[in-house]
Amino acid sequence: MWHTVQVIGHLGRDPESRQTAGGEVVRFSVATTRRWTGQDGQQREETVWFQVSAFGKLAEVCRQHLSRGRLVLVEGRLQPDEAGNPRIWTGQDASPARPTTWSRTTWCSWTRPGGKMANLVILSGPIVSPPFFDFVGERKKPYMRIYVSVPSDNESGPRECHVRCVAYGQLAQETYPFLREGSVVAVEGHIQVRLLGKPAEGKPRWVTEVVAHRITFIDNVDYETGNRVLEQLEQLRAERDGG
C-alpha cells in the first residue's frame, strides 16, 4: 500500500520556519487551479489550497529559496486527522482555508513563472467499506464512492489514512460491479474539497476526496459476478433514461 501527491501551484505566503526536537520544520501554502469546460459549454474553475510541511534539509532549502507567489512542484503524502480521514484546515468561519496537508514533503522544486498548474494523486490500497453506487443529478449520471486505506502519519505517529475516492460516468459504471470491501485497487486522479451539507448544529461539513481518472484492479477479480452486476446496472440505467 502506498500513495503520493504531486502539486504544481503558487505559494500563498512566505514559508514559516520553526525549530523542533527533531530539527527544522517549514510550512507554506500552495494553490493550484484546475480549469475545464462543463457539460453546458461554460468554462469552470476550481482552486484547491494545500498546506505543505517540509522537514530537515528540505525545510532549509524551502526556507532559503521559496517566497510568496513562486511557482513550485511539490511531492508528498496526505496527512490524516484523528479519525483517519485526510485533514482539512478550516478558517474561523469553518470555510476550508487550508483544505489539505501532507505529513512530510519528500521533494520540492521551483519552476518558471507562467507554468501550468497541476493537482495529481496516485494511491494504492484495500477498500475498507462496501462500495456505494447510484445515478445522480438530473441526467442520472453514474456515481461511485469508495474508501481506500493507505499508510501515512500525523503528529501521533504512523497510522492509516482512509481516502475517499469518487468516480463518475462510464468509469463508475464499469468498475463498481467488480469491486468489493477488501479489494485492492490503484487509483489515479485529482484532489477536490467540497461542501457536503450542514449537520444539525449548523456547521458546514467539508470533505477532501480524490476524483478518479483511472482505477486499476490489483488483486483477483470475480468477473462472472461482476458482469452480472454490470448487466443489471445497464438495464437500470436504460429504464431510468427511458423514464
Image (tube, helix red, strand yellow):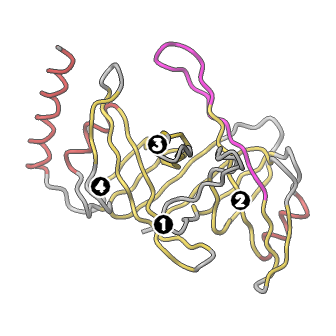
Q: Residue at x 68, y 51 (%)?
A: 50
- Disc 3 + disc 4, Cβ < 8 Å: no
Q: Quadrant of the C terminus?
A: top left
The answer to whether residue 133 is above or below residue 82 is above
- Which of the two discs, 3 and 4, labels the residue nearer the N terminus? 3
Bin the neighbour count of mark 1 within 10 Å (Cα to Cα): few under 14, some 14-19, many 20 and up: few
- What amino acid type should be assigned to the residue bearing mark 4? Phe
Bin the neighbour count of mark 2 within 10 Å (Cα to Cα): few under 14, some 14-19, many 20 and up: many
Residue that carries the numbered disc 2 in the rendered image: 52
The answer to whether residue 110 is above or below residue 32 is below
What kind of element bears circle 4? strand
- Separation of marks 4 and 2 at Cα, in angstroms: 31 Å
- Which of the two discs, 4 and 2, labels the residue nearer the N terminus? 2
> Where residue 204 appears, x then y in whole percent?
56, 43
- What amino acid type should be assigned to the residue bearing mark 2? Val
Residue that carries the numbered disc 4 in the rendered image: 217
Residue that carries the numbered disc 3 in the rendered image: 211
Within the image, what quadrant is residue 153 found in? bottom right
Magenta stretch: residue 32 in it?
A: yes
What kind of element bears circle 3? strand
- Disc 1 + disc 4, Cβ < 8 Å: no
- Disc 3 + disc 1, Cβ < 8 Å: no
Q: Looking at the rendered structure, which numbered label has been put on residue 83?
A: 1
In the drawing, does residue 28 fall left or right of residue 213?
A: right
State which region is magenta: 28-45
